[in-house]
Amino acid sequence: MKVVVVSDGPFGERAYDTIKKEFECEYIVLDIPKPESIDDFTEFPNEQLEKIKSADILITYTLNPDITFDLVEQVYDNVGYVIVGAWKGKGLKNQLESFKNVICPDIMCELVENGNKIFDEFVSKFGKPKVEIKVENNIATEIKVIRGSPCGGTNFVAKDLLGKNISDISTKAGLRIQHYPCRAGRIRLFSDEESGRYKAATFHHDAFEKALKKRVNK
């Protein structure tokens, strides 16, 4: 499994740092010449384009919608699956997802299996949070991240809550993900920050709640 994370600067490096611990991963900041006119088709450097085309999973964090669309259009047929981590507007989302192997999630920690072998292999490790908790005397003695948010937020929460009383650990998980800080609102260009953060908080709360119901007691 090879994952390529593509950015135009502001976002993506955290995802790269997290994903490379599980899969072969490369982080590419696009070197794109400034277009002469607004209608120009984006020309990507050949060396970078070839590296992108070699990916099993491509994750884009490019903020310019024209660049995002042009990139996906040029490479979607070569890569296994494309995850668009930053997009703006339902129109762009519909255009991008008209390609057979492209998904535009509201936030990256909502990804779940969809039946595609390559995508599901990636999502077995990254996407909607899933944890396991071991408990002794109402204290979380071990928190194992089975599937975590690509940004590393789930790992942050698990480490922070280790050794804490489980009585309100689910609520704390929802709160702590926002202290990572969660970037859901800033990358979710089509909506306000609150809605993205609320989703991330809910997903982490629910993950810990489910884990508690299945917890291993010492």
Image (tube, helix red, strand yellow):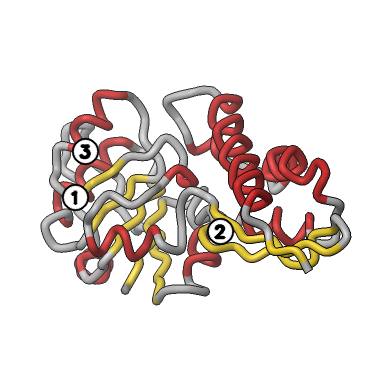
Residue wearing tag 2 = 14
Estimate the x, y position of residue 44 in percent, counting from the top left: 23, 57
Residue wearing tag 1 = 101
Q: Quadrant of the N terminus?
A: bottom left
Estimate the x, y position of residue 80 in percent, counting from the top left: 20, 62
Which is in the foreground here, disc 1 or disc 3?
A: 1
What secondary structure is found at the residue carrying circle 2?
helix
Count how many numbered circles sit on residues in the image: 3
- The residue at the point 19 percent across, 62 percent down is 79
* Horizontal relation, residue 132 to residue 129: left or right: right
N-terminal label among 2 and 1: 2
- The residue at the point 45 percent across, 43 percent down is 110
Residue wearing tag 3 = 96
N-terminal label among 1 and 3: 3
- Real-space CA distance between mark 3 and mark 2, rounded to the nearest whole angstrom: 24 Å
What is the three-letter code of the residue carrying label 1? Answer: Asn
What secondary structure is found at the residue carrying circle 3?
helix
Which is in the foreground here, disc 2 or disc 1?
A: 1
What is the three-letter code of the residue carrying label 2? Answer: Arg
What secondary structure is found at the residue carrying circle 1?
loop
Q: Residues within 10 Å of mark 1 (few under 14, many from 20)?
A: some
Q: Quadrant of residue 56?
A: bottom left
Estimate the x, y position of residue 76 in percent, counting from the top left: 16, 54
